[in-house]
Amino acid sequence: MIAKWRWILGQLGQQMWVRSTLFAVLGIFTALVAVKLDPFIPVEVSASIGADAVFQVLNILASSMLAVTTFSLSVMVTSLGAATSNATPRATRLLVRDPTSQNVLSIFLGTFLYSLVGIVALNTGYYSDRGRFILFVVTIGVIGVVVFAILRWIDHLSHLGRVGDTTKRVEDATAEAISIHVATPYLGGAHLTPDMLEDAGDSERVFPDTTGYIAYIDMNSLQETASEHGVDIYLLALPGTFAYPALPLAALKPNAAGRGKDKQTLEKAIRTAFTIGTERSFNQDPRFGLCVLAEIASRALSPGINDPGTAIDVIGRGIRLLHPLLAPGRERDSKDIACTNVFAPRIAAEDAFSDFFTPIARDGAAIVEVQIRLQKALLALCEMGDAEARHAAKQQSKEALARAEGALTLEADKQRLRDIAQRVAEL
């Protein structure tokens, strides 16, 4: 349960309003706590700063920060619209959670509230002469922070929302999910093989009580539940699966330590370990990142955009992402397994290839340069991957060649593709 709460807090921390609220509270606290430092300021130093000087600076900050915050929000909305139109709506959540944008907007909002509270406190006589001096010094520091934030924001705006920037964000998020998957290929549990599933037969199944995408599975909670009730838990649905009440989440198989505890309590604990939401998440779902990248390539290949270069760039990124996911030696030693009573299947190479290559092969069937790059990518993955990856690559190569031969008109282009596809088939 601790792991699930940590995941929930991590998701909450990525929300823009959370960071903005923290900076706003910090700004208000800074303005009010300045008076508490009165005893540490000599009287002769504080007398040199008048109330009007501090008031004017705070007034300028308050008015300018409100305008800058409004302008920055409008720029972000425009960038999100550009990413939605030119890339894919599924990538916009990465732009919303961009830490640089959140920090800059939070600094602007916090500075505005700091200035506003300072102006109110000055007008009500809250500050003494020494308090005004402290407020003035803090305000100078705040101005320095704001200047740095504006310069950073200007540089950040030069590429925010562009296709290349959006694609890189999706690649980075997918690479992070894949690295976690490679380190824990079964979500921290043991490998659920097809033979084990067959042996489970008609064992008891646990079904969800809601409909949506599985966003997170708390494996530590499942392990505690399995140990307490003396069962082995076979995961039948991984993160990214669209769950509904007729689709089983897990199968239960009593083990040697079976205690026959309450069935309803057991099923409730298993359901609680599954977080089901309305959208797929990048965290435990590497396939989602591959799907989003394929969507970007498909959008680039649409007649309205007609940008084969972006599709070719995405194919190159896909090779980088798929290689560690499909490389030989994916199995782990049993001593590395943290959840010994929870078994999960691994991501099938066929599914990963289908998520990424099928949309690109379909939408780029009539563009020879895209098809050549796609066939060469499959050839590279064939040479680097294991037997399962080679089989999936050969299947995708055949399908892509069939689509291209039906769409291309020049025989020379078809022959070039046949030559590369033949090399894939011969591996």
Image (cartoon, grey):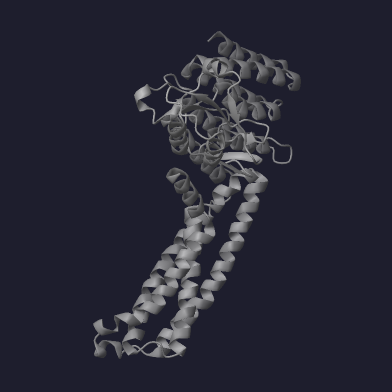
The picture quadrant where one finds residue 2 is top left
Answer above or below: position of 91 versus 57. Answer: above
Residue at 59% across, 25% down: 351
Evaluate whether residue 312 shows in this view. Answer: yes
Towards the viewer: 1 or 411 = 1
Name above or below for residue 292 compared with residue 335: below
Image check: 234 left or right of 32?
right
Q: Nearer the viewer, residue 99 or 233?
A: 233
Quarter residue 248 falls in = top right
Q: Position of residue 318 (x, y in %)?
A: 54, 30
Q: Quadrant of the N terminus?
A: top left
Tally the marks. Answer: 0
Q: Residue 206 at what x, y percent from top left?
A: 59, 32
Camera-nearest residue between 9 and 206: 206
Q: Is residue 309 visible?
A: no
Nearest to the observer: residue 155 or residue 383:
383
- Residue 48 percent location from the top left of the image: 31, 89
Left or right placement of residue 263 versus residue 191 in this view: right
Q: Is residue 25 above or below residue 203?
A: below
Give the percent coordinates (x, y) of residue 45. 26, 87
What residue is at 54 percent from the left and 51 percent from the top? 159
